[in-house]
Amino acid sequence: MADIDGKLLFTAPADGSGRLVFGYEGDSSAAPGAELGVDGDFPEMDGVTTLVIAYDMAVDGDFPAMEGDVGLQYDSGVFRGTRVGLEFSWQEAVPAEARLATAWQVSEAYAARLATSWREAIPLAARLDAAWQETERLQARLATAWQNAVPLSTRLASAWQETIRLESRLATDWQEAVPVSTRLATAWQETLRLSALMDAKWQEAIPIRTELRTSFGDGQLVARRLDTRWQEATWPRSGVSLPPVIAPPEKELCYDPATVARLVFSEARDGTGKLVFVCLQKGTELPPALVVVPSLRTYIMFNEIEVRRADSLSGDPLPCQGINMQLDRGSWTWTFSAEFHHSVGDAVTPGANGEPVELDVRVNGTHFRLQSEKKGWRNAFPERVVKISGRGKSALLAAPHAPETTYANAMAASAQQLMLDALTINNGASLGWQLDWQLTDWIVPAGVWMHQGTSMSAVAEIASAVGGYIQPHNTEKMLRVLPTWPKAWWDWDQLTPDFELQPGAFEVVDSEWNYKPAYNRVFVSGENQGHFGDYSIRGTAGDLLKPMVTHPLLTSIDAVMQRASHELSDTGMLITDQLTMPVLPQTGLIVPGKVLRYLDDNNVWRLGIVDSVNLQSQFPVLTQALGVRSHA
């Protein structure tokens, strides 16, 4: 029993009497009463009294001399109120000397202050013992992880320190390199013009004998000398001179006074009851358009789009679910995207080396040749859809299908000849492309032009020199070289519209007014062996000068005049209208560059240039969105 000395073992639950029976091993439910006597010297009762749920217990053993602490558990099972302090679990205990035995009592501060977890410690001599204390910087500064290191003599050891530039300057990635004699080794360095004195762009030219070719030479004297403002005046004769009678200018009317209150109809009625009044100045009429789309009550269209591989035109069309095509004056090729049934995935997949698949697309009877360059997939319940995108046939002249090379003119040639040379390969072998030249051609002296790029970039560079652009043919290997503006905007009254759209044939979905400075004068100049011109808009004072324009290919008066007309046409108040209309049999797909006359939402007849076209097809709807630019 030595292992249970001083322990009380209970074998029966509490009966509520509060009596303890020691040494009884019989039936716990009928235990006889017993008395317990404890004889011993108890020290002062310092300790903790814990109240717990009591159970019947039995103590079996010989009690030695009562030396030690005996913990008793007592449960009377009777609620006696708060007068018995030991019955209350949370009663405030009397502070005892052994204070550490009180679980929730606030202990007194000891001399060993480090025992307080969160108390602010007193800085010690060994400061490194404080985990978060600011340490003193030691001699070995590298021991501090984030301390600023002392710059060493080997400065390259500091990752972010500004290093001393060494003699070998090429070691600095972005350092300005020292020009070397072989200038062609620098990819973007301006090379020296050889033999021909073309080094200085603005060098004073040597007067030549062909000065009479400029349009700014001295004019010949004419007989009407009285037109000059500063003519030598004469003394007036004697007598009285009456001032001349100046008749007021006749006011221009939008109607004929002889037919006042008369309505003159030029079109048959359409049943809508709408009257469109057009202001025609006396004796003038709008020039007729080549194609007029009349106002009809109903437009019935049978839209049809068929897509076939160009090498299988006699086969069945591919199941196309939708197609979009775009072209504008800033692009030299069509761009498109289309969706097909997943069964035709292989038919529109580009080759293993990126060779595009040529497709023949027929839109309401008009054919287009397009190149499928990319393919993807899209899950559209309940089936999978094949997506393709690409460009027109002229994309074969550009990256990545065409190599880059360097073009130059060793001999004098016309601009059109330079374009044809750019459409060759391997010392003059033609690529099979032709030009539809609609600019005024000019001569380019030898050694003036140099370009590095593809055939298409070279052709576009030549056209842009005079304000032109490249437009592809729908199906053939042909490039159309067109002016951005068919005529200067102040001469647009001389333009014959390609199409006239009557109200009802279209819808203006968006209109934007773009205000640009109203420049009326510009200096245009070539560079080496170039030509210089000073141009103003006819009928203006030429007092608002546009920034000077230069280009190496402006080598003749014809080139300078075309570029000046282009620059001055893109000034003033420009209006960009977005028109939506069906692909009618009379018009087909209206491509950029066409002259369009239409009646806008303010009942004003506008004459503009088609700037872009966007074909949108989602069966059975087929529409074309036109971007038209005009001057206010």
Image (cartoon, helix red, strand yellow):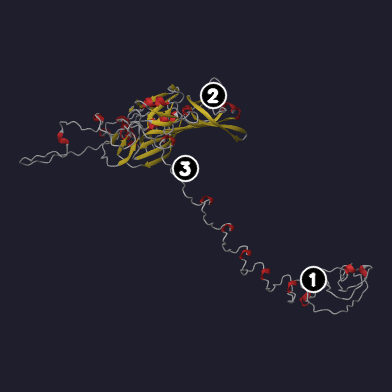
Above or below: residue 66 compared with residue 238: below
Residue at image position (81%, 79%) is 43
According to the image, label 1 marks what residue?
51
Q: What amino acid is labelled 3 in the image? A: Leu
Q: Nearer the viewer, residue 577 or 428?
A: 428
Which quadrant of the figure contains the N terminus? bottom right
- Total numbered badges shown on the rendered structure: 3
The mark that comes first in sequence, 3 or 2, is 3
**Secondary structure state at the residue bearing disc 2:** strand
Residue 510 image offset from top left, x and y in percent: 43, 39
Q: Residue furthest right?
A: 26
Q: Nearer the viewer, residue 383 or 225?
A: 225
The mark that comes first in sequence, 2 or 1, is 1
Tell me whether the residue at label 3 lies in contact with that at label 1, contact meaning CB atoms closer than 8 angstroms: no
According to the image, label 3 marks what residue?
170
Residue 425 image offset from top left, x and y in percent: 45, 24
Q: Residues within 10 Å of mark 2 (few under 14, many from 20)?
A: many
Q: 420 left or right of 247?
A: right
How far, Cα to Cα, is label 2 from label 1?
Answer: 96 Å
Q: What amino acid is labelled 2 in the image? A: Arg
User: Between tags 3 and 1, which lies in front?
Assistant: 3
Q: What amino acid is labelled 1 in the image? A: Leu
How far, Cα to Cα, is label 3 from label 2?
Answer: 55 Å
According to the image, label 2 marks what residue?
309
